[in-house]
Image (tube, grey):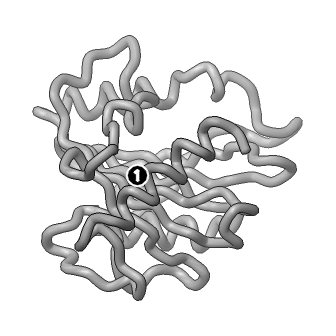
Amino acid sequence: MNLNTASMMLIVTTALLVPGCVSSNGGGDSNSVPVPTENLPEGFTLLAVINDTTPGANMEEEIANLRGEKDIGNVDATLGIYIWGEMGKNYDARVTVMECENEDLAQNAVDNYLTQPDFENPPFKGVDRFSTTTVNDHEVTEIRDRVDKQLRYLYIWTNENVVILVEGNSDRDSSRELASLTGQ
């Protein structure tokens, strides 16, 4: 077990101990939680919702890839963690919704994310790293990432001063469906 997996398991375990942070049936008050909690795509189960009030959570660590050369200012971020495969064998899907002080700072966060060194090369020979698609009437960047020998689909965009990052799975349709459930 690598350090990242152990750290994530510790955060998730901590979140499980906090009442109201976990939904066993994917239900929840969608007005108070900015990440999808209900009507999830087939195979996805909400494991935890984490924010600055979650004991043991370090949101700065969770949004580190959104920080970079460009300033993003003070932010308020929430992370949803979803199981979509067999726990311990498959990676988790994640949705990060981050409110910035203004639209320019939100765009800076997207720019920082897209220019990280891991994205300099294509995930596989002949496969483009980036493309654009539409989610909830917004033009979004689709990112293809390599996980083991599969593509993983990620989506990032802004809606005014809010940044939405959806780290889906190897199924493009279900990953886009999870992205659409953000309502952003």
Against 133, is 183 above or below? below
Report the side of 99 relative to 36 (left or right): left
Against 179, is 139 above or below? above
Residue identifier under label 1: 139
Q: Residue visible at 32% across and 55% down?
A: 50
Against 82, is 8 above or below? above
Residue 22, horizontal then vertical, whole percent: 34, 72
Q: Residue furthest top?
A: 69
Q: Residues within 10 Å of mark 1 (few under 14, many from 20)?
A: few
Q: Quadrant of the N terminus?
A: top right
Residue 153, horizontal then vertical, whole percent: 62, 54
Residue 95, horizontal then vertical, whole percent: 42, 56
Tally of numbered tags: 1
Residue 176, horizontal then vertical, whole percent: 52, 66
Q: Quadrant of the C terminus?
A: bottom left
Q: Residue visible at 52% across and 22% down?
A: 115
Label 1 amino acid? Glu
Report the side of 129 relative to 56 (left or right): right
Q: Residue 69 versus residue 132: which sits nearer the camera?
A: 69
Q: Residue 4 versus residue 177: which sits nearer the camera?
A: 4
Q: Secondary structure at mark 1?
A: strand
Against 21, is 108 above or below? above
Q: Residue visible at 45% across and 69% down?
A: 47
Q: Residue visible at 45% across and 57% down?
A: 12
Q: Is residue 137 visible?
A: no
Q: Is residue 122 visible?
A: yes
